[in-house]
Amino acid sequence: MSKHKRALDERDSHIRTLRMVCVGLVAGCLLLGYGWYSAPQNLTVHNPPDLRSGSTRAWWEVPPTTVYGFAYYIFQQLNRWPKDGSVDYEHNIHRLQAFLTSSCRVFLEKDAAQRKNANELKNRERAVYEIPGRGFKNSRVDVKDRDNWVVYLDLVTDEDYMGERVKSTLVRYPVRVVRNDVDPELNPWGLQLDCYAEVPQRLSIRGEPE
């Protein structure tokens, strides 16, 4: 009798152990599910272009290469007038407004209005691109702090009027870039152009690229 009772007790003890294990597994699954649900869906990590030598950096740190690439791409798109500057300039400002600070957007809208009233944009085509040999290097990105940079873009500025080249200049554009990671849906860069940090300067190329 005692042997049979001992077997029943061992069975009941084993069942209780299995029940506790099942409860633990369910609790663990609930915790994992909550962690998965509360995890961010998107996380932007900035990496340098060449990863052959590896890279170690804080996830929030934006490398100068990314800041320069952002500034050049947005500035080039802003100043690309393929048909008519009186239409294209305003269209670009509206299209790229998520990549511009509010103060920069207002500045550009005023600039577009003044140029339009002075008849400087009608049938004007424009393109900007890097001066050969004047692309990215560390000295072209002045790191002010973790969230502010000044990027020096050395660009060729070409303008045509009614199919005729009327302007081709070499200009250094010192543009300010700030961190503003508030709307990744519209601005996955998490950066915004804050217009000019200084007055743009004309360049004359002599000798080796700077």
Image (spheres, rainbow, N blue to C red):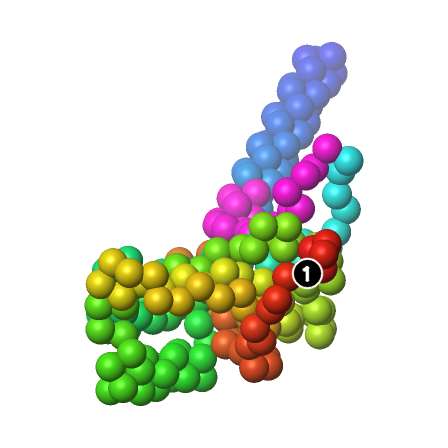
Q: Can I make out residue 165 in this image? A: yes
Q: Can I make out residue 16 in this image? A: no
Where the C terminus falls, by quadrant?
bottom right
Where the N terminus falls, by quadrant?
top right
Image position of 87 with respect to 70: above or below = below
Residue depicted at x 29% and y 78%: 120
Q: Which residue lies under the disc numbered 1?
A: 206
- Asked whether 138 or 63 is in front, the reply is 138
Q: Does the magenta portion include 47?
A: yes
Image position of 22 with respect to 38: above or below = above
In the drawing, does residue 123 fall left or right of residue 74?
Answer: left
Q: Position of residue 208 (x, y in %)?
A: 72, 54
Secondary element at image label 1: loop
- Asked whether 85 or 138 is in front, the reply is 85
Q: Position of residue 201 (x, y in %)?
A: 58, 76
Residue depicted at x 50% and y 70%: 193
Residues in magenta? Answer: 32-52
Q: Does the magenta portion include 86?
A: no
Image position of 71 with respect to 65: above or below = below
Q: Quadrant of residue 122?
A: bottom left
Name the main secondary structure of what is drawn in magenta. loop
Q: Quadrant of residue 59?
A: bottom right
Q: Position of residue 173 (x, y in %)?
A: 56, 71
Q: Quadrant of residue 54?
A: top right
In the drawing, does residue 70 fall left or right of residue 209?
Answer: left
Q: Position of residue 105 (x, y in %)?
A: 39, 78
- Asked whether 197 or 124 is in front, the reply is 124
Binning the other alpha carbons within 10 Å of mark 1 as few (below 14), some (14 to 19) or many (20 upward) gives: few
Residue depicted at x 44% and y 72%: 100
